[in-house]
Amino acid sequence: MKWSRYNRLFKSSKHGWLLYNSASNSFIKIDDTLYPEILRIQEDPNSFDFSKDPAFYFQLRTTGILVRERDDDTCRNLLKLGRLSNNYNTSHLLLTIAPTRACNFDCPYCYEKDRQPVFMSDETEDKVVEFIRRFQTVKRLSVTWYGGEPLLCFDRICTLTDKIQALSIPFDVLLVTNGFLLDAEKIEKLKDLRIGVIQITLDGPEKTHNSRRPLKGGGATFRTIFRNLETLFEKWHGKVLLRVNIDEVNRDDYHLIHEQLVEKLPKAYQEKRLSIYPGLVHDFAGTNPDIGCLITPDKEAEFTIEQYSRHGIEDLKTFPGRYYAGCTACRRNGFVIGPEGELYKCWDDIGIKEREIGSVWPGGTWNAALTSDYLVASSYLDDPECLDCFFFPVCDGGCAHARLRNLLDGRQNQLCLKFKNHLQELLEIHYELKEKRADEKTDGQSSD
């Protein structure tokens, strides 16, 4: 037996000795009386006598803290295999469909800002359906409506959804919208459109949001979006991912919009139908001259810690997760479809001719080289540094698009998890929240 290389033992000033293992994603508290024994086990587990406490040995084995000689390597290989299998799974088709590149907003950080506003035609719509039919092994379809602003083409979403439903393939739908056009009439049709999740963006309280997300030609948008949100939760029973785009300019306003949303939409928040999260503004492609205040992974960690310690916000991620999914960029059966039927691997590439990998229209050529760049060349699963990293079991490799830009353009985009340099502080918050919720549960049971 040996001490796993995926162990991290540290002492919290508030909570004592804590032990985290990234391979099993387990996290335990070590009593002070057990700490000397843990040190002995860490130094030489084979000389430690577990016969007096076999339950202790069982805990160390089941949490992956103690492993056999090759267990760590086997764990890494199995994780890699699982992720590769998922990436090349042909039974699941992921489509991000942009019926238009046009938008009614004029956000300064938008990477599509200078791309031509094109709308999908009836002929292209039919070709999209034919494209889906080609995937005969598909048993599940995931569709994301994207843009531009997809609700500028609401009728197109309706007609294309009808045609997709006629294919009799089980499918789920996410809508990414700025929320301005999501009025009561459209909300009534969401269930029939199979839309179960909607992402909407508010960049802060009213004044901040309106300065960052105005209408084209000028005009406030906050009140309309908020009114639509209230109607949405009254008439529809899906989930809203409320994104707040954060950079150094508006980071101090995050807690204000968070508090406002929780106060005004308490039921949706308590039922977990409203999920509020910060979307860190990056410009990995280096295409937008208006972005100069980006958030790095270290700053993301500091932001998370600050929101909890200063403002009591408890729903930001403070514990690593196990990743298998991956976006369309690293999935063999993942495609972004532009309004002219052009195909991409990443939605950041929409409207950039040299980033097209093919088309839904038959007879076109495929850019196999770019496809292989996304699927293979930029994969963190073959990066020696990633494979040897303590965080490999709980990391998805970061943005595939940014990784590819590093490879092809010599950029220095930071791709690591926010946990990498701030694991102890974030795990301390996680432990504190876990203890708090356990106490609340106990108090609730004792009062019954």
Image (spheres, rainbow, N blue to C red):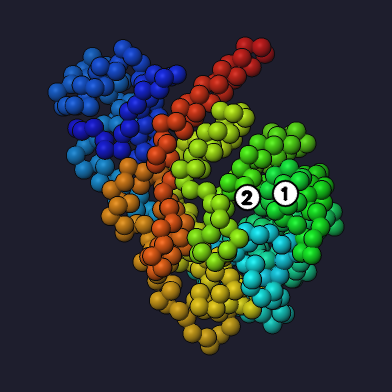
What label does residue 245 carry, if any? Answer: 2
- Whether residue 93 sits left or right of residue 22 in the image: it is right
Residue placed farthest to the left in the image? 47
Say which residue appears at 39% left-offset and 18% top-offset: 16
Three-letter amino acid code of the residue under disc 2: Asn
Is residue 376 visible to the viewer in this orientation of the structure?
no
x and y percentages locating residue 189 in the rendered image: 79, 58
- Whether residue 381 sits left or right of residue 182 in the image: it is left
- Whether residue 202 sits left or right of residue 411 in the image: it is right
Say which residue appears at 47% left-offset and 57% top-offset: 399
Could you tell me which quadrant the N terminus lies in? Answer: top left
x and y percentages locating residue 348 in the rendered image: 55, 65
Three-letter amino acid code of the residue under disc 1: His
Instruction: Report the front residue among 378 and 84.
Output: 378
Q: Residues within 10 Å of mark 1 (few under 14, many from 20)?
A: many
Mark 1, residue position: 209
Instruction: Report the front residue among 258 and 373.
Output: 258
Query: Between marks 2 and 1, how big is the CA–CA gap?
Result: 10 Å
x and y percentages locating residue 29 in the rendered image: 39, 22
SS at mark 2?
strand
Say which residue appears at 58% left-offset and 34% top-offset: 307
